[in-house]
Image (spheres, rainbow, N blue to C red):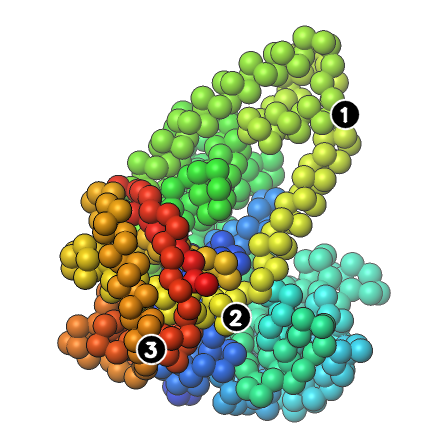
C-alpha cells in the first residue's frame, strides 16, 4: 500500500462515519508563542478541545504536517524523523471509548488488512491521579484482541499531556504491530525498544484537566484524539523495517546515492544518508512557510537542520554544493500532496544554496580555530564540542584531523559536554512550553481580539492594501506583522492608536457566525485567503468596524480590552512592517 492510498483510506473511512475533513494547518502555530512548530494534529485544535465549538462540527479528521525538534539527535535510525505526516481523527465531546476502540480495530484489520494476531495494545496502568483503564482493556477484548496481548503501562508510556503545565490530558491506548522478530527476553513487550513491536496508532482519551495545583479534574467535554504516523505505517504495510525504503524517502535516498557515488546498502552510509534525507526534507517544508535560516526561533532550527545535513554530506565525501539537488528530489516526491513546496521551489533552492555557502565559510573559520587549539599538542573533549557547536565541526572530522597531528581526543569528555548541552536545551524547550500550548488565558484572549482592531485601524489609516502578514501573542504583549512599503510616521502611529482606543471606548460587541468561506468573502471579510480553509469558517464582526475570518478566542465586548498602546514600529522584511503593542 502506498502512502497516498493510506492517506485516502484513512480519510474515506472517517468521512463515511460523519467526520469532516479539515486541511493541514501551517507548520508555524498561529498566535501561539509557546511552541515553535506544529508537532501533532491536535495542536491547531486546542481551543475546540477546551470547549469552543468548531465550525465543522464535533467529528473531524485530517492529514497534518508536523515537525518535532526534540529528536534531532535520534534521527539516523530506521524510524525517527523531524518532519512527518500525522493522520488523526477527533471527537469533540461526541463519541467515546466504546465507539473509538471498535473503529480502531476495524480500520487496522478490515481496511489496512493487518492480521489481528499481529496486533498488541497497551493501556494505562493507573496511579494516584487516575484509575487503571480496565474499561479500555475490556473493549479491546470485545473487539477481538485476546487478554494476553493487552498490556498495562504507566504514565510515561500510556498518558498524553498536558502539553504545558496545565491543560487537557488523559490516558491513552497504543496499538503495536508485531514484526515477527525474536523477542529480546522474557520482559519483551510492546514499548520495548528492541524492534519486535512497532507502535502504529495511538488513541488518547482526553478526560482530565491538569490544574496549576497539579490536580486532575474531570473535563466537562471529553474528547477523543488519535494519531497515526504515515511514514511508520506505510513501512509496516509494505513489510519494511526501514521507513527510508518507502516511497516517501527512497527517491531522496537514490538522489543522495547518485550525488555521493555511494550505496545506501553499505551499513556505514545508512546513518548519514538518512540524516541528509530527513533534514533536507524538513528544511524544504520549513522554507515553504516563509522562514529563513537565522540564529533565533524557527530560523535557528532550520539553520541547524541544513548545516547538520551538510556536515553528514562531508562524511560521505560530498564536497560540492548538493542541498538544492536533494531538495529537488523532495519536491518531486512530495509536491503532488503538498503543492506549496512546488510554488515556493525557487525560494527554497536559493535559501538552501545561500545557507550552504555560509556554512562552508564557517567550516573554514573552524579549521583555523582547530589549528590554534592543536598548537598546544592537545585538544580536550570540551574543546572538540566547542568546535562542533560553534563551527559545525563533526566530532569525527575533529578526530580525523587530530589523528594526523598525533593528538588524541577524549571521546567520553566530548559526549559529557554534548549531554550537558542537550540537558540545557531540553530545559530551554520546557520553558518554551511552560505557558501551556496555545495559551487561552484572559489576557491572551484580549490581545487576540485587539489584533482585529489594529488590522482594521491600519487599513483605515494607511489604505486597504494593508494585510496581516503574521502575529505573535504572549500574556505581556502582541506583535503584529503587516504589508506596507515604508516606515510609518509618528502621525500615522498616533492615528492608528487613537482609532483602536476609540473603538475600545465604544464597547462594541464582538460577535461571530458560522458561514461558508464563499459567504465570508462575499461579505467582505478579511482573511489570508491564500491559506487553506475549511468548508465552514467562523466570521467575527466587531460592530461595523472589523470583519474577519478567525478561529478565536475573543472577548465579548471591546470595552474589556483596556488601553491600547503601540510601543514599537519596525521593518520585518521586504515590504513588511511590524508593530509591538500592549494593553493596560
- Name the N-terminal-most of marks 1 and 2: 1
Query: Element type at marker 3?
Result: loop
Q: Which residue is mark 3?
A: 507
Query: Element type at marker 2?
Result: loop
Residue at 73%, 26% (x, y): give it. Answer: 381
- Name the N-terminal-most of marks 2 and 3: 2
Q: Which residue is mark 1?
A: 410
Counting from the top left corner in percent of width and height, residue 350 is at 31, 36
Q: Dividing the picture into quarters, in which one does residue 527 lie?
A: bottom left
Q: Nearer the viewer, residue 471 or 566?
A: 566
Counting from the top left corner in percent of width and height, residue 411 is at 74, 29
Q: Is residue 530 left or right of residue 328?
A: left
Counting from the top left corner in percent of width and height, residue 419 is at 71, 40
Query: Element type at marker 1?
Result: loop
- Name the N-terminal-most of marks 3 and 1: 1
- Label 3 crowding class (10 Å Cα cut-off): few <14, some 14-19, many 20+? some
Residue at 57%, 28% (x, y): give it. Answer: 390
The answer to whether the residue labelled 3 contacts the one labelled 1, judged by CB atoms less than 8 Å apart, is no
Counting from the top left corner in percent of width and height, residue 226 is at 54, 74
The answer to whether the residue labelled 2 contacts the one labelled 3, judged by CB atoms less than 8 Å apart, is no
Q: Dividing the picture into quarters, in which one does residue 543 lie?
A: bottom left
In front: label 1 or label 2: 2
Q: Is residue 141 left or right of residue 488?
A: right
In front: label 2 or label 3: 3
Q: Which residue is mark 2?
A: 441
- Label 2 crowding class (10 Å Cα cut-off): few <14, some 14-19, many 20+? few
Residue 350, visible in the rendered structure? yes
Q: CA distance from mark 3 to mark 1?
A: 67 Å
Amino acid at each position: 500500500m502506498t502512502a497516498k492510498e493510506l492517506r485516502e483510506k484513512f480519510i474515506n473511512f472517517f468521512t463515511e462515519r460523519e467526520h469532516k475533513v479539515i486541511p493541514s494547518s501551517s507548520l508555524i502555530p498561529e498566535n501561539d508563542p509557546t511552541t515553535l512548530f506544529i508537532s501533532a494534529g491536535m495542536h491547531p485544535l486546542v481551543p475546540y478541545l477546551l470547549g469552543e465549538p468548531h465550525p465543522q462540527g464535533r467529528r473531524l479528521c485530517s492529514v497534518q504536517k508536523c515537525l518535532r525538534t526534540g529528536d534531532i539527535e535520534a534521527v539516523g535510525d530506521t524510524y525517527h524523523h523531524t518532519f512527518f505526516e500525522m493522520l488523526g481523527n477527533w471527537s469533540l465531546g461526541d463519541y467515546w471509548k466504546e465507539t473509538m476502540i471498535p473503529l480502531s480495530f476495524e480500520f487496522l484489520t478490515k481496511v489496512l488488512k493487518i492480521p489481528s494476531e499481529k496486533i498488541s495494545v497497551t493501556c494505562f496502568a493507573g496511579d494516584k491521579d487516575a484509575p487503571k483503564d480496565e474499561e479500555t482493556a475490556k473493549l479491546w477484548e470485545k473487539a477481538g484482541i485476546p487478554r494476553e496481548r493487552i498490556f498495562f503501562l504507566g504514565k510515561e508510556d500510556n498518558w498524553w499531556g498536558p502539553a504545558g503545565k496545565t491543560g487537557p490530558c488523559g490516558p491513552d491506548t497504543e496499538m503495536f504491530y508485531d514484526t515477527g522478530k525474536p523477542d529480546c527476553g522474557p520482559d519483551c513487550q510492546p514499548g520495548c525498544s528492541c524492534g519486535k513491536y512497532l507502535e502504529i496508532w495511538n488513541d488518547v482519551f482526553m478526560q482530565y484537566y491538569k490544574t496549576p495545583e497539579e490536580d486532575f479534574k474531570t473535563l466537562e467535554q471529553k474528547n477523543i484524539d488519535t494519531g497515526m504516523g504515515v511514514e511508520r505505517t506505510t513501512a509496516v504495510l509494505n513489510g519494511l523495517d526501514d521507513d527510508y525504503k518507502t516511497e516517501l524517502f527512497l527517491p531522496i535516498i537514490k538522489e543522495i546515492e547518485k550525488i555521493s557515488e555511494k550505496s545506501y546498502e553499505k551499513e556505514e552510509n545508512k546513518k548519514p544518508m538518512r540524516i541528509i534525507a530527513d533534514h533536507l526534507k524538513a528544511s524544504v517544508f520549513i522554507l515553504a512557510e516563509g522562514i529563513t535560516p537565522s540564529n533565533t526561533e524557527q530560523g535557528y532550527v532550520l539553520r541547524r537542520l541544513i548545516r547538520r545535513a551538510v556536515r553528514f554530506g562531508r562524511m560521505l565525501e560530498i564536497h560540492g554544493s548538493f542541498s538544492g539537488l536533494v531538495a529537488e528530489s523532495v519536491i518531486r516526491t512530495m509536491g503532488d500532496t503538498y503543492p506549496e513546496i512546488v510554488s515556493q521551489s525557487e525560494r527554497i533552492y536559493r535559501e538552501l544554496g545561500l545557507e550552504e555557502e555560509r556554512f562552508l565559510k564557517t567550516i573554514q573559520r573552524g579549521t583555523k580555530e582547530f589549528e590554534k587549539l592543536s598548537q598546544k599538542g592537545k585538544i580536550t573533549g570540551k574543546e572538540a564540542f566547542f568546535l562542533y557547536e560553534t563551527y559545525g565541526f563533526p566530532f569525527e572530522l575533529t578526530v580525523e584531523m587530530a589523528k594526523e597531528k598525533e593528538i588524541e581526543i577524549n571521546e567520553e569528555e566530548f559526549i559529557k559536554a554534548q549531554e550537558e548541552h542537550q540537558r540545557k536545551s531540553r530545559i530551554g524547550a520546557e520553558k518554551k512550553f511552560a505557558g501551556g500550548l496555545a495559551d487561552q488565558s484572559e489576557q491572551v484572549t484580549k490581545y487576540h481580539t485587539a489584533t482585529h482592531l489594529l488590522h482594521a485601524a491600519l487599513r483605515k489609516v494607511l489604505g486597504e492594501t494593508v494585510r496581516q502578514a503574521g502575529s505573535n501573542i504572549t500574556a505581556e504583549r502582541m506583535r503584529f506583522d503587516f504589508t506596507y512599503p515604508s516606515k510609518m510616521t509618528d502621525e500615522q502611529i498616533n492615528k492608528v492608536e487613537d482609532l483602536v482606543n476609540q473603538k475600545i471606548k465604544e464597547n462594541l460587541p464582538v460577535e461571530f457566525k458560522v458561514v461558508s468561506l464563499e459567504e465570508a468573502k462575499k461579505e467582505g471579510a478579511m482573511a489570508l485567503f491564500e491559506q487553506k480553509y475549511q468548508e465552514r469558517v467562523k466570521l467575527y464582526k466587531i460592530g461595523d468596524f472589523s470583519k474577519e475570518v478567525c478561529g478565536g478566542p475573543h472577548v465579548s465586548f471591546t470595552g474589556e480590552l483596556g488601553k491600547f498602546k503601540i510601543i514599537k514600529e519596525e521593518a520585518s522584511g521586504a515590504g513588511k512592517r511590524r508593530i509591538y503593542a500592549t494593553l493596560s
